[in-house]
Image: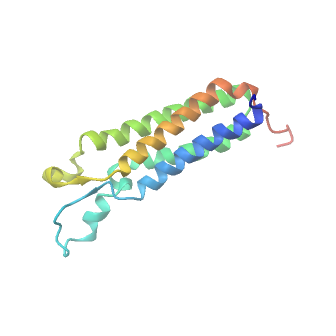
Amino acid sequence: MTMTSRREMIAVLAVVLVGAALVLLAGTQPWASVPGADVTEPTSVEAALKGSAISPGARALGLVGLAGIVALLATRRMGRRVVGVLLALAGLATCALSLFWSVDPPALLGDASATVDRTFWSWVSVAGGVLVLLGGVLAAIRSSRWPAMGSRY
């Protein structure tokens, strides 16, 4: 059974949508916790451990992924290829920013980095970045076969 060009386009758009949603969701979640933290600790410390504070660029790139979906729908052949390449680059950058935190905690936490437990949310952001990257590559390669909006739009 072969996939029609319309179904292929919808599948790629769905991959990018899920990836961008994962990145945005991960940005709202805590990427680390401080074991044995005192209850009287200010909430600003908690806020500093969320993905949006640790890696704000990753969350912004999640928004780029959502904008890319609209751009893929609104453009035609060469425009779609350019958008696909931009989506692939955004996915790659999201992976890099999220992996930076996962492998080596940034200076945001200072000396406390040795006593910080990382959560899995940074890896969720990496997975979302991989999906956006995959969708962007597929769009760059296959989008010339997809149907386009009418010229009146």
Q: Would residue 63 be found to the left or right of residue 72 on screen?
A: left
Q: Is residue 45 visible?
A: yes
Q: Quadrant of the N terminus?
A: top right
Q: Would residue 61 be found to the left or right of residue 67 on screen?
A: left
Total numbered labels: 0
What colouring does the structure picture have? rainbow
Q: Report the residue at 58% width, 35% height from top.
A: 135
Where residue 74 sits, quadrant-wise, is: top right
* Residue 3 in the image, given as x and y percentages of width and height: 74, 31
Q: Would residue 22 be found to the left or right of residue 120 on screen?
A: right
* Residue 132 in the image, given as x and y percentages of width and height: 53, 38
Where residue 2 sits, quadrant-wise, is: top right
Q: From what the image shows, is residue 18 above or below residue 6?
A: below
Q: Report the residue at 55% width, 43% height from top.
A: 65
Q: Report the residue at 53% width, 32% height from top.
A: 88
Q: Is residue 82 visible?
A: no
Considering every residue shown, the one lying at the far bottom of the view is 40
Q: Quadrant of the C terminus?
A: top right
* Residue 117 in the image, given as x and y percentages of width and height: 23, 54
Q: Report the residue at 24% width, 45% height from top.
A: 106
Where residue 8 sits, quadrant-wise, is: top right
* Residue 51 in the image, given as x and y percentages of width and height: 36, 53
